[in-house]
Image (tube, grey):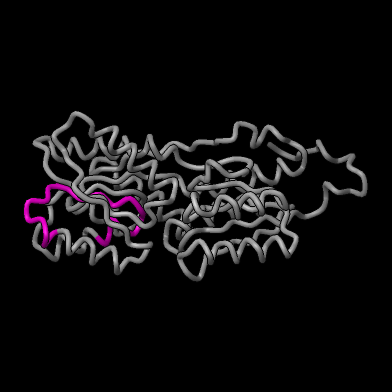
Amino acid sequence: QGCDNKNSGTANGASQKKLRLAFVANTADEYWAIVHLGCDYATRLLGDVDLDFRFPAEHTAKAQQEILSDLVAGGVDGIAISPIDAENQTDFLNHIAAKTLLVCADSDAQKSKRTCYIGTDNVAAGTQAAELLKAALPQGGKIILFVGYPNAQNAKDRIQGIQNGLAGSNLQIIDTLADGTKSAIALKNAQDALAKHPDLAGMVGLYSYDGPAILTAVRGAGKAGQVKIVCFDEDSDTLAGIAAGDIYGTIVQRPYEIGRQAIIRMDKYLRGDKTQLSDGKILIPAHAVTKDNVASVQASLKVILHP
C-alpha cells in the first residue's frame, strides 16, 4: 500500500496527527491476545495511531460501557468493540456512535448505529460446525451447546447456523448451557451435562475456552473419543485435543486479521477514505480444523504468539 498521500494537503497538517483508536474486547483469553497482536501489527504498520486495547475487568455489559464512557471522555477518535449483549447495549452504543467512530468487531450489534461490523460470518461458521458434527456423528444422537453469552450476536448467529446445518439430520440439540465466559462454570456445565445425559453423543463449545473445558470434562468422565466434541477457535488446548484425537474438530476464525483490519480500516476511514467501512459488513472467512490439518495450524499459531 505504501504511503497514503490522500490527506497530505489537509489544513494544519491534520494528516500527520496521531489518531487515538481503541479496541474493547469482551473477555481476556488467548483468542483476544491474538486479536490484540493483530491490532499491534496494524499500529506499527501505520505509524500514525495510538492504540488503547482494553479488556473489561468483569464480563458484563456494564463493565464494557464504563470503558466506552471513559474512552469517549478521553477524546478517542474511534472504537472497535465486541458487544457482550448487543440487544441491551444498543441504546448505549448509539449514544457512543453519536460522539465517535464506532465499529463492531468479532460480534455485531446489528440494530445499533455502528458504522460497520468486521469479523466472522458467524451463521456460516455455525453451518461449518454442523458439517463437522454430521461427519463425527453419522448415526446421529443428542448434542448440547455450551456458550458464554447467549445474547451476543455471534452466539445467536452460530446457533442459527448450527440449527440450519443440522436441519433434516438425526442430530438433536437438547440443551444450550451458558457460562458467562467463566471457564470454571463452563467445566461444571459440561460435567453436569455428562452426568445428566449418559447417552449424550456430542458437545459443542461456541466460545474459545469452551473447547478445553468440555475436553477436561469428557476426559474426566472417561468418555474421550466416545462423546464427540466440536468447538470454535484455536485455543492451544483445543488444538492439542484435536491432535490427540479427543476433539473431532474446531471452526477457526482469524482473530489476528480481525484486529489488523479493524485498526487499519478505522484509521483510513477517519483520514478520508470512506470506502474502508462502506459496506457495513466486512466478513473474514472461518475454516474447519480437524486431525488432517491441525499440525499446520499449531505451527502458524506458535509463530503469532511466540515470534
- For this view, does 138 lie left or right of residue 24? left
Q: How many marks do you count on the picture?
A: 0
The percent coordinates of residue 305 (x first, y second) are 45, 58
The percent coordinates of residue 250 (x first, y second) are 29, 46
- For this view, does 79 lie left or right of residue 145? right
The span picked out in magenta is 194-213
Q: Can residue 44 be seen in this view?
A: no
The percent coordinates of residue 12 (x first, y second) are 92, 49
Q: Residue at x 18, y 47 (%)?
A: 174
Q: Which residue is drawn at 56% across and 53% down?
A: 81
Q: Can residue 293 be seen in this view?
A: yes
Residue 133 position by quadrant: top left
Viewer-side residue, 115 vs 12: 115
Q: Which residue is drawn at 32% across and 39% down?
A: 288
Q: Is residue 184 magenta?
A: no
56 versus 99 height, above or below: below
Residue 209 position by quadrant: bottom left
In the picture, which quadrant includes the N terminus?
top right
Q: Which residue is drawn at 35% across and 66% down?
A: 182
9 versus 96 height, above or below: above
58 versus 128 height, above or below: below
- For this view, does 60 lie left or right of residue 96? left
Q: Does the magenta stretch include residue 196?
A: yes
Viewer-side residue, 82 vs 65: 65
